[in-house]
Image (cartoon, grey):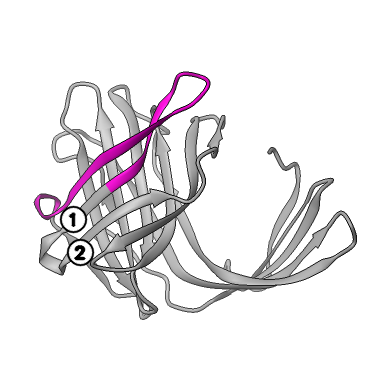
Amino acid sequence: MWIDDWSWRSLSSEPLPGNLKLATEQFAVNLQLMAAGQYALIGENGYHKKHDLLPRASYAIESPFVKTVGTLALANGKVLTIKGRAWLSKEWGSELVGASYVGEDNFILWLNDDEALLVSRYRYKDNMPYTSAAILDRQGNVKNIPTDDISIRAIGYTEFDSGRRVPLSWRLQVPSYDIDLVIKARKRDNWVNFVVPQWQGAIMANGSHQAQGFMQLSGY
């Protein structure tokens, strides 16, 4: 579903608190978003490397703990009170994709009430994939995880009518932090044809932690 009627408005000099509104013929959402933790800079003070050998990197700032409350208005006139949590991320760099870039796999997972895990896997034509990860807490502290201590692999694919085979089940292991998770998509049909076509949607994870989060996959 494409939504053209939407707006985001900051309520201060910073992105949060903010107000997100969107509307379709079937429903309308009005959300208030409030920071429930500090901003965090991943990588080297926000400099996020995407390969050891290739000149690929970006800057990123993360706000992994965002509280949301608001209303969901249905077409039949019923209005529901809703609440949840969100993750605000801003990334920028000098290029959208590089010449050798194939796609990427991004995962955000709330491990518990105080810690969140961010994992990104970048895929290239003529080079091995590069994986980066970090654990972020509410105080803005960041634990960058060495690349060789991260194992992420697809364990289940879903084939769409278009012929695309997209990995919607994964195994994630970070031995140094006793993390061993099986990740699965909550909903299958979330492929969107953006400028960079991608699958994105909610995920759940079981194993060493009972976690929830969000997954974004491109290049399939």
Position of 38 compared to 137: left or right? Answer: right
Q: Where is mark 2, residue-wise?
A: 179
Residue type marked 2? Ile
Residue type marked 1? Gln
| Front in this rendered view, residue 10 or 178 | 178
Above or below, comparing residue 195 to residue 177 in the picture: above
| Front in this rendered view, residue 203 or 215 | 203
Q: Earlier in the sequence, mark 1 or mark 2?
A: 1
Above or below, comparing residue 139 to residue 189 in the picture: below
The magenta span reads: 147-170
Q: Quadrant of residue 149?
A: bottom left
Q: What secondary structure prevails in the magenta region?
A: strand
Rounded to the nearest angstrom, the CA distance separating label 1 from label 2 is 5 Å
Return the x and y of residue 200 as percentages of the image width and height: 49, 43
| Front in this rendered view, residue 180 or 90 | 180
Q: Residues within 10 Å of mark 2 (few under 14, many from 20)?
A: some
Return the x and y of residue 118 as percentages of the image width and height: 32, 58
Residue 157 lies in the magenta stretch: yes
Residue 19 lies in the magenta stretch: no
Could you tell me if residue 13 is visible in this image? Answer: no
User: Image point 50% across, 79% down: which residue?
Assistant: 36
User: Image point 89% across, 57% down: which residue?
Assistant: 76
Return the x and y of residue 183 as percentages of the image width and height: 33, 52
Q: Residues within 10 Å of mark 1 (few under 14, many from 20)?
A: some
Rendered-image quadrant of the N terminus:
top right
Q: Where is mark 1, residue-wise?
A: 173
